[in-house]
Image (spheres, rainbow, N blue to C red):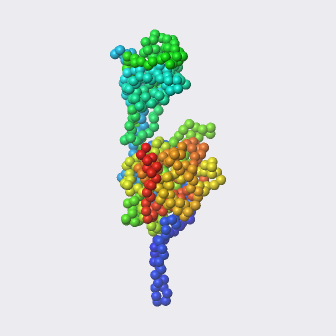
Amino acid sequence: MKKIFFFALYIVLVSCGSSKKTVYKPLPNVTDFQNTITEEGLFLDLSIIASDSLEGRDTGSDGERKAADYLASRYREFGLSPVGDDETFFQYFTLVKPFVDSIQYRLMVDDELLDQSTHSANSIGSFNTLIGGKTSKNGGIVFVGYSIFDEETGVNHFDIDVEGKWMFGFYDRTISSFSTMQRLVNEQNALGAIMIAETDEESFIDQAYIMQGEFEQSSGLQLPYLNKIEDDGAFNSIRPKLAATLLGLDSIAALSELESEIKTEPSTFVPYEIPGTLEHIPSLSNVEVQTRNVVAFIEGTDPDLNDEVIVLTSHYDHVGISEPDANGDSINNGADDDGSGTVGLLHAAQAFSVAKQAGAEIKRSILFLNVSGEERGLLGSRYYSDHPIFPIENTIANLNVDMIGRRDNENVDTPDYVYIIGGKIISSNLQTILEQANKLSVNIELNDRYNDLNDPSQFYRRSDHWNFGRLGIPFIFFFNGTHADYHRVSDEVEKIDFEALKKRTKLLFMTAALLANSDTIPQVDNQQFILRTKE
């Protein structure tokens, strides 16, 4: 490997006869250091970050911890400052993985217990909770026939007060209106639904056994301080035999006959109240998962500006291990998502470190932030933005890189593009700096295809930049577009276009360099974006 030497301001005394002449050499410019970013260096780091030994870097896993340790060791080699907890390169935080352990149901009719049962991984009961139901609920019951709401025909089986009550009725997705039940939960505070989804006992029992597996599955990772359980509606199916009893019928055959009558003449049905109550009691638990963001810092050289911080972000987590593919590969290496952005951040940091050591002026400070938990809901960036190491009001911009190592189907013949999300849809000044940086570095196409607050893909809020944008911080999201290997075991290092990765990393570095030394800081000046952050 060739060594490159850079020299700061120095003075050479040259003898000329008996006189001495002082020669001044100017300080280097930070922008001169973009060429320290190389394909070879990016390849070496990505080969480690996206290796099988890291087992797909799932949030909180051993593989992710190895990745964090590796990133910290590289930042330490570059001479960056550890600004995390206890003077480390880590910002630690805890996530919780919520589970529904069981749901108990108590059905009372005329103040007498008609049924009490529990659904869990080890038992089945008289109800299956299909959707929602993570909070306890207790209320009366109204019979809503075939659960029909049809504005064209005027048939409304919900024409009764449902506030604080369960909507009990037959359900056929081709006839019944699930959307109306959801609306009545949201707008009229109905508790939820008790649905007679079939009049066959065996079908109900088969479904109950299938759903036992749901009790062993978590709904995902959450930040505990944001872990507010929604008081959502509970949509339950009921055992047909119990449904018949609740309706005062003596058999399932009678239940089927009633179903046929209402289905044949839906316009004649009138909803009514049943003298009973259903209590729905879930039992919940949480498993804690420990993880960490990686944080490394370069302090600005200008004492009047170095309290202003530019935050560069990538996520270093991925989706872990899945079912084996046809070749037996089960490790989702995430070379592009977001191994590419992670090593891009590393090499931008190295370039800034070399520049500063050589005496280049970098007026504002720069934080390199590799976050955990992006794949689980932007959790690491949310934690940082809620618990910033440097005040949010001093954060002048966020530059985020997520998937910058490939070409999409629309650009198969060239690496000379990058999708830009943010910039001008937030801050015209930030866009100007980006365009200047591009001209001074790689001069690639700044593609605006997804740069629209109304774009259906909604990429402006789908990666870590959004947790800065929601607080009114201007951002740019650098992105290569989607491809067939997204979240698959086939997202491998050998598919990375290192020429494209190098160019996008240089653009990231140059944009940050111009921001660091700009006479002004970017301002949010798009009113539409301001309104969007308040939604």
Quadrant where the N terminus sits is bottom right
Quadrant where the C terminus sits is top left
Above or below 476: residue 276: above
Spot occupied by residue 505 in the image (x, y as percentages of width and height): 53, 57
Above or below 148: residue 85: below
Q: Residue at x 57, y 58 (%)?
A: 503
Q: Residue at x 43, y 57 (%)?
A: 523
**Foreground of the two, 505 or 235:** 235
Q: Is residue 7 left or right of residue 231?
A: right
Above or below 355: residue 224: above
Q: Quadrant of residue 190?
A: top left
Spot occupied by residue 453 in the image (x, y as percentages of width and height): 50, 47
**Foreground of the two, 330 or 172:** 172
Furthest-bottom residue in this view: 18
Residue 528 appearing in the image: yes
Spot occupied by residue 380 in the image (x, y as percentages of width and height): 43, 46
Q: Residue at x 36, y 24 (%)?
A: 138
